Image (spheres, rainbow, N blue to C red):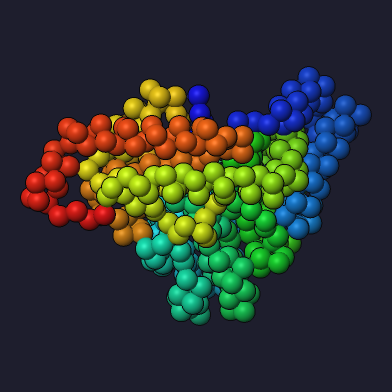
Amino acid sequence: MIYADNAATTRMSDAAVHTLTSLLNETWGNPSSLYGHGQKAKDVLEKARKEVAEVIGAEPREILFTSGGSEADNQAIRSAAELGRRKGKMHIISSAFEHHAVLHTLEKMKGEGFSVTLLDVHENGMIVPAEVEAAIRDDTCLVTIMTANNEIGTIQPIREIGAICRRKNVVFHTDAVQAVGHIPLNVSEDNIDMLSASAHKFHGPKGVGFLYAKKNIQLTNLIEGGAQEHGKRAGTENVPGIAAMAEALKEANAKMAENAAHLTKMRDRLIDGLRQIPHSALNGDATHRLPGNVNFCFEGIEGESLLLLLDDKGICASSGSACTSGSLDPSHVLLAIGRVHDVAHGSLRLSIGEDITEDETDYIIRSVKEVVEYLRGFSPIWRDLMAGKKAFIL
Ligand SMILES: *Cc1c(COP(=O)(O)O)cnc(C)c1O
């Protein structure tokens, strides 16, 4: 099997599995307990906090452990909104191609009286800092723009956006779930006030993540209860999961340059190969892009059928869309970069992993070519396109 869906989730690293299982066996105490067994768990927890903080250039007390990226996004937005409300600032800026954890939270905030500006995403999948600046108003309390998009992999100019927010005295949050452990990030150099991350996107376990919040930002609780996490996130901490996350992050960070060099080479090989398919297009900028992300549209086919046939060939990929059974809506990300419905339906996201080989890359290219050709063979849309009854878009 070739696993090319690392944007959905990653396999846990051996080191992370080892940390998780050994802690489950040995250090299962409650970190809030005062006896030695509990305090051992507390030590593990605080060591993990220090390690995570160090990787992103934060202080340990600025790291709040959560159940993952979605929770971190929810808490970041709600906290900044609450701080804004107290000052009478009820305007939030974001973009049209954010993850649903951000977009759906913003919908809720609208219901609570906030106004939300969703910036347009350019055709190349990029947000322009000057357009962020132009959208900032006197009553803007938050700008939330993702570091890297989970479907098309484009990396946003967050340092510039952060600098604008600093200058304008607006809180800047970034959903960095796809970026942490994959590309260099430093919250102080990158002018970030709040950042969300998730362990299972960098070879850690699922159900664990963290929120970085600069120390002057007062967080709003999503979960009330005990005084864990400085009273900002109640519930007994998932100590083994958190320690395994820290382990995975250290490893990803140490190997980042090496991994990125290999992935970029394989990514560009895939892009070059898939571009040879007629009436296809790469989605998102070719260079401002995550090292492991490839996303294409192929005219005249359905992404879902493509995925099923690739699965038969042992390739795990994704359409990169929310197009699950029951919903036939094309990806909001592809629509945001201006793909029309018909074209957006024929999408393929390959998010490759560090262990991919050149042979596997070539096998993917061959397989996609074969399957696209096969599907076009009996696609009514393709027949109309070829007969000139419909105009090609790509
Ligand atoms: C996966 C993902 C999330 C959600 O993270 P979970 O840990 O699965 O809740 C949020 N944002 C982006 C960009 C993601 O890729």
Q: Is residue 323 left or right of residue 210?
A: left
The reply to whether residue 31 is in sight is yes
Q: Position of residue 383 (x, y in %)?
A: 13, 41
Where is residue 300, by image quadrant?
Answer: top left
Residue appearing at x 71%, y 67% in the figure: 189
Q: Nearer the viewer, residue 250 or 211?
A: 250
Q: Is residue 69 left or right of residue 327?
A: right
Q: Nearer the viewer, residue 125 or 218?
A: 125
Residue appearing at x 41%, y 62% in the figure: 124
Q: Is residue 25 left or right of residue 342?
A: right
Residue appearing at x 55%, y 37% in the figure: 358
Q: Position of residue 360 (x, y in %)?
A: 51, 32
Where is residue 394, by image quadrant?
Answer: bottom left
Q: Nearer the viewer, residue 16 or 365?
A: 365
The reply to whether residue 216 is in sight is no
Q: Residue furthest right?
A: 36
Q: Residue furthest top?
A: 25
Q: Total label count?
A: 0
Residue appearing at x 83%, y 36% in the figure: 44
Q: Position of residue 89 (x, y in %)?
A: 52, 72
Looking at the image, residue 132 lies above or below residue 385: below
Looking at the image, residue 337 lies above or below residue 372: below
Q: Position of residue 30 (x, y in %)?
A: 79, 30
Looking at the image, residue 72 lies above or below residue 166: above
